[in-house]
Image (cartoon, rainbow, N blue to C red):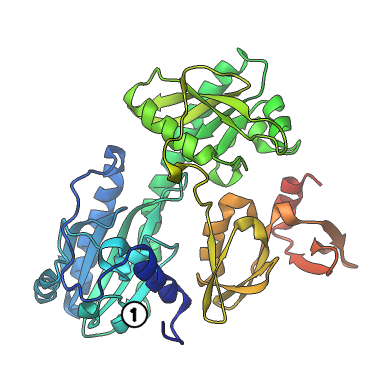
């Protein structure tokens, strides 16, 4: 691997080489697999198609091509300069081809599906040598519930650089699509919370509701106590806002949720249970799940602790037992560092570079821009407290007031790490910490 390569590109190269084993001599993208996307994403693809067609007219005079893909990197449409489109088609940059990193290596579309925020891939930054004369910029649209990519939009030029304004345009262009995804997330949460409230009175034990991503959005007091969420949590009244939802730290739960969703999609009356290590150093607790269905889709789960009803979860696959948790990628001494979110105390921005302060020292984030890092870490209990700082709320050790009333967070009492809190963020922070 070469030195002097941008961290996000180097991380992509490692994925292409070690995880996906992409052939660098590939010169034509493979055809896409035939499995279809979720029907309820049609609104999103329609909106993106309109954006792509509009942008195609704008970039035609620059000799560029605009493409839209689904969350698997399958090209759904292409617009732009006819000459550039014909050249793109020589590499199968056309509808129903696959441009995921797994299939085609580092490229604007595929790499944007792997990370948050806009991605530029220029010339030899492409993994496959046949694409070295292209310059690409892409951005993914992500499901705010699951964090998974839903689609991407990309602009490509042959043998010429892209405008420096393209990443900003992409970010602005997908904002309206993000609003539709956000609106759907709120709608689904309200459905699940309504069903939770209807059923809550029928159970005396710990009872909670999860969205389809496995995040807790409602729980009774017994469940809040069992999961050690804290007394002032919005989960008690129902958390429609995605940022307020809580990720339970229960080993194996994410695999069980996926299993339950697959089973329930086939049968709306389904129920099933799994035994999970809810409390450390205690015996596994049975957890029974029942789906909440809307328009023939599973939008959430109602979960009763200590109850064992329905189909039993059995993990027969070695991959399903203890699958790897989510990792944040950092860079140190030209090496990639894989970090669990819980290892990170806080993140500090130095212009576009983000430093992660961890148990292993100060590590540069592979993702550039604090906004992009924030999107990756928010589901794990991180919150912005200052324009330059993002903190892990679970790692706040002490609070201290300055002589002028300003607030500081002490993240490590041994080393006296101070993180300033801006006046704008102070009220929300106090509410979240219950002080």
Residue 359: x percent and y percent? 70, 65
User: What residue is rendered at 61% in x and 57% in y?
Assistant: 341
Query: Which residue is rendered at x = 16% and y = 56% of the image?
Result: 96
Q: Can residue 159 be seen at all in this image of the molecule?
A: yes
- Residue 406 vs residue 182: left or right? right
Q: Camera-side residue: 392 or 255?
A: 255
Give the x, y percent position of residue 389. 66, 67
Does the image show residue 384? no
Q: Residue 415 lies in what quarter of the image?
A: bottom right
Q: Mark 1 points at which residue?
A: 125
Q: Tell me the SS state at disc 1.
A: helix
Q: Which x, y percent locates residue 100?
A: 29, 61
Quadrant of the rendering where the N terminus is positioned: bottom left
The crowding category of the residue bearing disc 1, from other C-alpha atoms within 10 Å (few below 14, some 14 to 19, many at least 20), is many
Q: In this rendering, is residue 312 above or below 76?
A: above
As drawn, is 214 to the left or to the right of 158? Answer: right
Residue 311: give x, y in percent of width and height. 45, 21
| Rendered residue at 50%/31% (across/down) | 190
């Amino acid at each position: 691997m070469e030195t002097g390569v941008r961290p996000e590109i180097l991380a992509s190269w490692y994925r292409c080489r070690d995880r996906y084993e992409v052939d660098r001599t590939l010169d034509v993208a493979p055809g896409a697999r035939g499995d279809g996307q979720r029907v309820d994403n049609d609104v999103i693809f329609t909106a993106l198609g309109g954006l792509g067609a509009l942008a195609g007219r704008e970039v035609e005079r620059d000799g560029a091509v605009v493409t839209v893909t689904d969350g698997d990197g399958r090209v759904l449409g292409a617009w732009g300069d006819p000459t550039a489109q014909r050249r793109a088609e020589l590499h199968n940059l056309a509808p129903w081809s696959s441009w995921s990193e797994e299939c085609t290596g580092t490229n604007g579309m595929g790499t944007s599906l792997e990370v948050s925020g806009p991605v530029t891939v220029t010339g030899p930054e492409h993994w496959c040598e046949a694409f070295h004369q292209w310059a690409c910029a892409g951005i993914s649209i992500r499901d705010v519930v699951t964090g998974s990519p839903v689609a991407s939009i990309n602009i490509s030029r042959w043998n010429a650089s892209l405008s420096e304004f393209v990443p900003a345009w992409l970010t602005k262009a997908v904002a309206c699509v993000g609003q539709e995804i956000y609106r759907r997330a709120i709608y689904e949460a309200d459905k699940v919370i309504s069903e939770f409230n209807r059923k809550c009175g029928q159970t005396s034990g710990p009872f909670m509701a999860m969205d389809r991503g496995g995040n807790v959005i409602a729980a009774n007091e017994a469940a809040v106590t069992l999961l050690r969420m804290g007394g002032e949590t919005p989960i008690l009244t129902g958390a429609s806002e995605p940022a307020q939802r809580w990720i339970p730290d229960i080993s194996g739960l994410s695999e069980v949720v996926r299993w339950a969703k697959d089973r329930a999609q086939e049968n709306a009356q389904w129920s099933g249970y799994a035994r999970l290590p809810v409390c450390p150093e205690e015996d596994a607790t049975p957890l029974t799940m029942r789906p909440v269905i809307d328009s023939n889709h599973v939008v959430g789960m109602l979960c009763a602790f200590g109850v064992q009803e329905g189909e039993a979860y059995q993990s027969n696959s070695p991959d399903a037992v203890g699958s790897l948790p989510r990792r944040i990628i950092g860079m140190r001494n030209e090496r990639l560092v894989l970090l669990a979110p819980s290892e990170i105390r806080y993140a500090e921005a130095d212009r576009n570079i983000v430093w992660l302060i961890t148990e292993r020292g100060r590590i540069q984030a592979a993702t550039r821009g604090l906004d992009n890092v924030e999107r990756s870490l928010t589901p794990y209990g991180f919150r912005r407290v200052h324009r330059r700082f993002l903190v892990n709320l679970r790692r706040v050790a002490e609070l201290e007031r300055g002589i002028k009333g300003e607030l500081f967070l002490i993240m490590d009492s041994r080393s006296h790490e101070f993180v300033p809190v801006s006046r704008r963020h102070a009220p929300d922070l106090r509410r979240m910490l219950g002080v």
